[in-house]
Amino acid sequence: MTVLLYILGVLFVALGVGLSIGLHEIGHLVPAKKFGVKVTQYMVGFGPTVWSTRRGETEYGIKAIPLGGYIRMIGMFPPRPGDRPGMLRVSSTGRFSQLADEARQLSLEEVKPGDEDRVFYKLSVPKKVVVMLGGPVMNLLIGVVLLGGIVSLYGVATPQKGADVAAVSECVVAAEQATTKTTCTPSDPKTPAYQAGVRPGDRFVSIAGQPITSTTDVGRLVRPRVGQPTPVVVERDGRQVTLTVTPIRNTVQQVDDQGRPKVDAQGKPVTVDAGFIGVSSQTPVAYVPQPVTEVPGIVGEQLKATAGIVLKIPQKMKGVAEAAFGSGQRDPNGPVSVVGVGRMAGEAASGGVPWIGGRDGISPFVFLLSLMASLNFALFVFNLIPLLPLDGGHVAGALWEGLKRSVARLLHRPDPGHVDVAKALPVAYAVSTVLIVMSALLIYADVVKPVNLGG
């Protein structure tokens, strides 16, 4: 059953990624056709074509490598000023100029008789921006719908009164050794909680007859009771269980009024000899639906966090490389490939993540939906980067054209014409190369050193 659930989780995300890419391209396709541009291809994926069909003048299909998609609009690159319609002059023998000429030639060959006014470069600046922003905006809408539905129908994690058992230590360890000693030896004494049968996931109801309303209550009631058999009532599987725990004297870390561990100026734990039973507790949470008016703020925070990751991609990729080829650990808030997203989905669906499922955990299905929402927000933000071949690069070219024409009108100068986007192709090829290398590195890292959702 676990393997089946893992496979279903992966398939769910694979379908979600495909739909997200397909809808992204529809965001380009619909306005392009609306504005009269001839679109010859609509493809989800890259590489060899797996399936395709033709409807009118457009071929619709699916390709073998599901790492993106595209629509092919005729006339993406304008001719150079001075070129006769349908003719292309060779500009120079420079490699970059040749690349631009080859792109113009291919663009020119796509324009058949009667299609001269259906080319992309002849669109007005606002129409170009609408076509190129259509894809990212579609991803934004998908993310908003998914996250908005989760927030308003399922809810967000909200702290509740009480204290849950997060972990039970098997053996007694002093506070100074808590971060360095990770295994118990046969000679190590067992902790009182372990001996009494306290389990992770139990919810404290009372200790020594006193009700537990917060995590700070646990330490406050346990520490003074060294050597005193103490009744501890926990809630387990919907019923109350009474256990007897006898705290022992141990060196434990002090906590403040908020339950936060104290450290000194050097960052070392501030300790005290007090009663100890060997549990760590956490605040219970419940998922509480929020009003729709809260959705814009939550979406804004999500976009802000996503943009922060995108802006730090060079630094994040350095950490990915160090983890993949060294002993470092992956950053759970760092970038992942589609392989990594698939692994996360499989682990979440199969119950391999402690905080997904269970009494206080998020529903696995809701987690998968939130994963797809995050993916679409990432596609939205990433595609806004103003570099070719990303959508943001085409938007930047259109805005630059509009700016040049506006300045020319203000200064009563001749119309400068269309911006020659082909001149930026060397940048596009460089960016594409970087993206391919990044994708390969992320896929490799997600295979050999995946992100650990369990913390």
Image: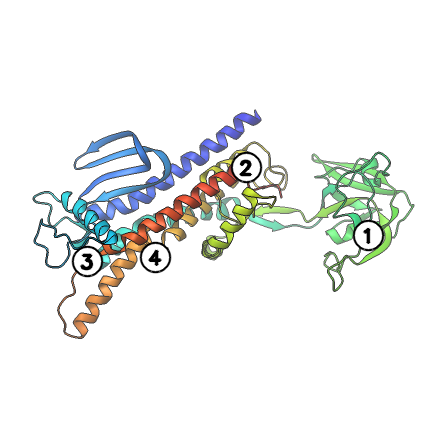
The amino acid marked with disc number 2 is Val
The amino acid marked with disc number 4 is Pro
Q: How many marks?
A: 4
Residue 104 vertical placement versus 368 (above, below): below
Give the residue number, with chain letter if any, for mark 1: 252
Q: Earlier in the sequence, mark 2 or mark 3?
A: 3
Name the front one of labels 2 and 4.
Answer: 2
- CA gap, disc 1 and disc 4: 54 Å
- CA gap, disc 2 and disc 4: 33 Å
Q: Earlier in the sequence, mark 2 or mark 4?
A: 4
Give the residue number, with chain letter if any, for mark 4: 386
State the image quarter where residue 261 is shown.
bottom right
Give the residue number, with chain letter if any, for mark 2: 448
On the image, the x and y values in percent for residue 307 come to 45, 56
Name the front one of labels 2 and 3.
Answer: 2
Relative placement, left or right, of 351 versus 302 is right
Residue 8 vertical placement versus 37 (above, below): above
Q: Earlier in the sequence, mark 3 or mark 1?
A: 3
Residue closest to the eye, 248 or 72: 72
Give the residue number, with chain letter if any, for mark 3: 124
Name the front one of labels 1 and 2.
Answer: 2
User: Looking at the image, can residue 295 be seen?
Assistant: no
**Element at label 2:** helix
- CA gap, disc 2 and disc 3: 48 Å
Residue closest to the eye, 98 or 195: 98
Q: Earlier in the sequence, mark 1 or mark 2?
A: 1
Residue positioned 87% across, 45% down in the render: 247
